[in-house]
Image (spheres, rainbow, N blue to C red):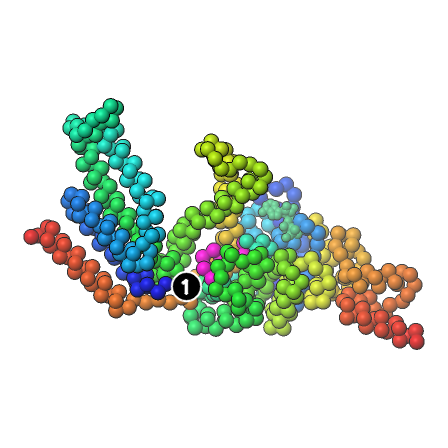
Amino acid sequence: MTNAIQKLYPSTKMSIVLAVILFTLMMPGYISQYSVFPIFIIIAFISGVGTKFLSAFIKSIFVLVLFIFVFQCFLIPSDTVIWSKGILTLYKEGLEASLLMTSKIIAISSSLIWFFLVTPIKDMMFALEKAGFSKKFTFVIYSTIQLIPQMKKLSQTILEAQKSRGIETEGSLMIRLKAFLPMLGPLVLSSIQQTEEKVLALEARAFSATVRKSSYYQMSKKPVDYLVISVIFIGFMIFVWWRFFK
Amino acid sequence: MSMITMKNVYYQYPLEKEQVLKNINLSIEKGKVYGLVGHNDAGKTTLCNVIRGFIPSFYRGKLTGEIELDGKTIQEYSMGDLATRIGYSFQNPFTQISGVKETVFEEIAYGLENLGTAPEVIGEKVRELIAMFKLDALQEKNPFELSGGQKQRVALAAIIALDPEVIVIDEPTSQLDPQGTEEIFKIIDLMKKKGKTIILVEHKIDLIAAYVDEVIVMSQGEIKMIGKTSEVFTNKEVLTYGGQLPQVALLSLALQNAGITMPTIPITLVEAQQAIEKILSREV
Ligand SMILES: Nc1ncnc2c1ncn2[C@@H]1O[C@H](COP(=O)(O)OP(=O)(O)O)[C@@H](O)[C@H]1O
Ligand SMILES: [Mg+2]
C-alpha cells in the first residue's frame, strides 16, 4: 500500500467513478465512451493494479459484452442487413444498439473495477462509518464483499473432501456438474449456519451497543484529495458547459 | 454477594420435545470462579447461553423461571449492556471470529470500537492484551488463518478487552496443547485476581481442581451437585453422573477404603504430596 493513488481517500476515488458515470451517460455516441477503457488501463497500471484490472475485466465484463454483441447483432432481426453468410446475418440496428450499450457498460464497469481494486475494504468501511452510515449498513456491505471469497473457499474445502472420498470432480461438464450439485446443499446450509453464528460473535463484541462506533484505524483527506476533487469538479463543469451550453 | 441468581429455570429449544434445562437453581457469587462440568449434551452450553441472554433473545424456545444479574432481571438489560457486563467466549472456535477484521490486532480492538472507545485508549488496551495473551507473533495475521486454539485465545482476549464483570468461557482449551491450556488457566487466574466472576466449562478435571472455587455438576439438563471444589471433587457421587474425579482423589479414596486413613482427601497434586508427607511422618 505505498501507491499514492491507492492512498487517496475513498470518496475522492468515488468522485472519479461518479464523474465517469455521468460523462458516459451524458455524452452521445460511443467513441468517447470506448476511450474511457484504455485510459483506465493506464490509470490501473499507474495505480499498481494493471494486471489485476485486466484479468478482472476479461473474466467478467468482456464475456458479458461478447454475449450482448452476439445476441443483439445476429439474433434480433431488423431491416438493414450489413453482412450475411449461411445462417449468420449481421443487422445494422443491432450492431449500433450493441455498440451504444457496450460502450457504456465498459466505461462504467472499468471505473468501478478500478475503484474496488485500489480501495481497501478497510478504507471503504472507515469512510462509510465516518460519513454517518450505521454499523449495520457497513456490516452488510462488508459481509457481502466477503461472501464470494468465503463461498469460494468453502466450496474448495467441500470439493477436496469429495475428492478424498473418491468422487470425480474434474473432467467433462457432466462430471463437474455431478460433483457440484450435491455440494450446493451443504454450501448453502453452512453459509446460513455461519451467518447465524456470526451474529452471536458480533453480539459478544457489543455490536448492539447504542453509542457511536469509533475506529482504531484512522485516515483523513489530504491536500491531494482536495486537489483531485477540485480538478474533477472543474473538469466536469467544463464538460457540462461544452456539452449543453456552447 | 450474588452476581447471578437463577430460580426454577426450565428451557426447551424450539421444535424439540424435551426440556434441555430442568429446575435450575443457582447462585453465582461475585468474584468466584465456577467450574461447570458434566457429560456431553448435559446442557452446559445451553446454560451458558441462558446466562448470557442469547436464550431467549437469539435462540427462541420456551424459557421459564427467574434469572437475575446484579439484582435486576436479565430482561431489564439491553443487548448492548449485556455485552459489556457478561463476556462470552464460545465453544466453537469458528464462532469466535467477527469476520469483519483483517488482523488479530483489529479483531481484539473491534469490541472497543463498538463501545466508542477513543483510538488511543484502544491501542493501549489491545497492546496490553496482546502481551498478556502472548499474541505478539500473531497480531498482524488474518483471524481466519489461525488454528482453532489460536482463534479461541484471540476471542478470549477480545472479550476481556471489554472488561466485563462476568466472564463465561465455554471449553476454551478443547483445541489447545498442554502449554496453551496452562496459559489460558493463568489468564483465568489473573482475571480472578482482578475480581471477575468466572463461569468455566471445562473437561480437564485436574486443572479445574487446581483453579476453580466451586464446581457445578450437570447431568441431563439438571444441576446434580454444587459446592466447594474440595467437597464436590472428593465425593464419589460425581461418578454416577458421568463425571470424573481427579486421579489423586480417586487414589486417596481407594487407599481409605483399603484402611489407610487420609488426613484429607487431596484433589491436586500439591495437596496429595502434602497428605502423603503427613502420613509418612506419622508412621516414622
Ligand atoms: N440449537 C439447538 N436446538 C435444539 N437442540 C439443541 C440446540 N443446541 C443444543 N441442543 C440440545 O440440547 C442438549 C444440550 O446441549 P448442550 O447445551 O450443547 O450440552 P453440552 O454443552 O453440555 O454438551 C443436547 O441434547 C443438544 O442436542
Ligand atoms: Mg457444550
Which residue is disc 1 drawn over?
A213
Q: Position of residue A194 (x, y in %)?
A: 51, 49
Q: Which residues are magenta?
A: B95-103
Whether residue B264 is visible to the viewer of this picture, yes or no, is yes
Q: Image point 88% across, 62% down: which residue?
A: B255
Query: Relative to B187, is A74 above or below?
Result: above
Query: Relative to B91, is B1 above or below?
Result: below
Q: Position of residue B179 (x, y in %)?
A: 65, 65
Q: Residue A237 versus residue A42: which sits nearer the camera?
A: A42
Q: Image point 32% across, 40% down: which residue?
A: A63
Q: Residue B239 versus residue A234: which sits nearer the camera?
A: A234
Q: Residue B255 versus residue B176: which sits nearer the camera?
A: B176
Query: Relative to B277, is A137 above or below?
Result: above
Q: Quadrant of residue A227?
A: bottom left
Q: Is residue B96 magenta?
A: yes
Q: Position of residue B84 (x, y in %)?
A: 52, 64
Quadrant into which the N terminus of chain A falls:
bottom left
Q: Image point 45% across, 57% down: which residue?
A: B100
Instruction: Name the kind of residue labelled 1 in the image.
Output: Lys
Q: Secondary structure at mark 1?
A: loop
Label 1: chain?
A
Secondary structure, magenta segment, majority class: loop
Q: Residues within 10 Å of mark 1 (few under 14, many from 20)?
A: many
Query: Is label 1 within 8 A of ligand 1 (CB to nearest ligand atom)?
Result: no
